[in-house]
Image: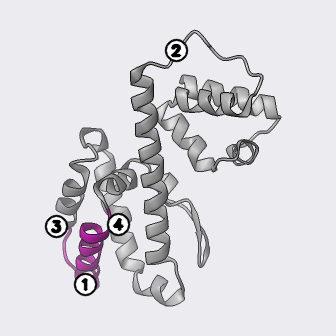
Amino acid sequence: MNEASELIDKLKRYYKVGTSQELGEKLGVAKTTISGWKQRNSISAIRRKIYELGLNIDIDKNKANSIDDEIDDLYSLLIDKAAYDAKERLLSKYENDIGSRLATYFEKDLLKEAIRDLAADKNKYTPQNMKDAFLERLKGFEPGIMKDRQLQNLSTTIEKYFPKIEVYALVHYPEIVFDYVGYFGQTKFEK
């Protein structure tokens, strides 16, 4: 278990809650922020929240915030914001109403397929080169009767409207990006 998970467990015991959703409500953050803290082992971000709320939780105070911690914090904030922005962009593109949902069904499936394909090697990509790799992966898809137009639409959407860091968040944290309530209810990223 990483240190972030241990701190999150301490917070759950402190508040006497069992889920990340409940803990997020107590801390005033989204449950996706908590899962992001765990995934990135963002100890300093959790410590800062504990100090901010003035909680009496036993944490290792001997670990001083170093410049590396500050860089990690900034990186975590950028990734959290990118995941949130990508989620909002997907929600507005694919989940506005029944018409857009039906018209973009295949496009959204192609997006998920590309994410799954790149996920196996995701650690070799950075926020700077993930978008190029993503667009290359889309070019490698076999065009089909129903896929040609959707593939072109998806490529254009990624190219024009998704910054590099949001494409990085799509591939690295799809469970966070796809965790939203759309027109037809809760949407999750199925692996």
In front of the other: 142 or 88 = 88
Instruction: Write down the quadrant of residue 181 in the picture.
Output: bottom right
Image position of 139 with respect to 134: above or below: below
Secondary structure state at the residue bearing disc 2: loop
Image position of 121 with respect to 108: above or below: above
- Residue 64 numbered mark, or none: 2
In the picture, which quadrant includes the C terminus? bottom left
- How far apart, in angstroms, are the residues tagged by discs 3 and 4? 12 Å
Q: Is residue 154 magenta?
A: yes
Which circle, 2 or 1, is nearer the viewer? 2
- How far apart, in angstroms, are the residues tagged by discs 2 and 1? 54 Å
Residue at the spot of label 4: 111
Q: Residue furthest bottom?
A: 99
Using a 10 Å C-alpha cutoff, classify the residue at mark 4 as few (fewer than 14 neighbours), some (14 to 19) or many (20 or more): many
Asked if the residue at tag 1 contacts the one at tag 2, i.e. Cβ–Cβ closer than 8 Å, the answer is no
Instruction: Write down the quadrant of residue 148 in the picture.
Output: bottom left
Amino acid beneath label 1: Arg
Amino acid beneath label 2: Ala
Residue at the spot of label 1: 149
Using a 10 Å C-alpha cutoff, classify the residue at mark 3 as few (fewer than 14 neighbours), some (14 to 19) or many (20 or more): few
Secondary structure state at the residue bearing disc 3: helix
Region of the chain picked out in magenta, as a range: 139-162
Asked if the residue at tag 3 contacts the one at tag 2, i.e. Cβ–Cβ closer than 8 Å, the answer is no
Using a 10 Å C-alpha cutoff, classify the residue at mark 1 as few (fewer than 14 neighbours), some (14 to 19) or many (20 or more): some
Q: Position of residue 29 (x, y in %)?
A: 65, 47
Q: Quick one: label 1 or label 3, which is nearer the N terminus? A: 3
Asked if the residue at tag 1 contacts the one at tag 4, i.e. Cβ–Cβ closer than 8 Å, the answer is no
Amino acid beneath label 4: Leu
- How far apart, in angstroms, are the residues tagged by discs 2 and 3? 47 Å
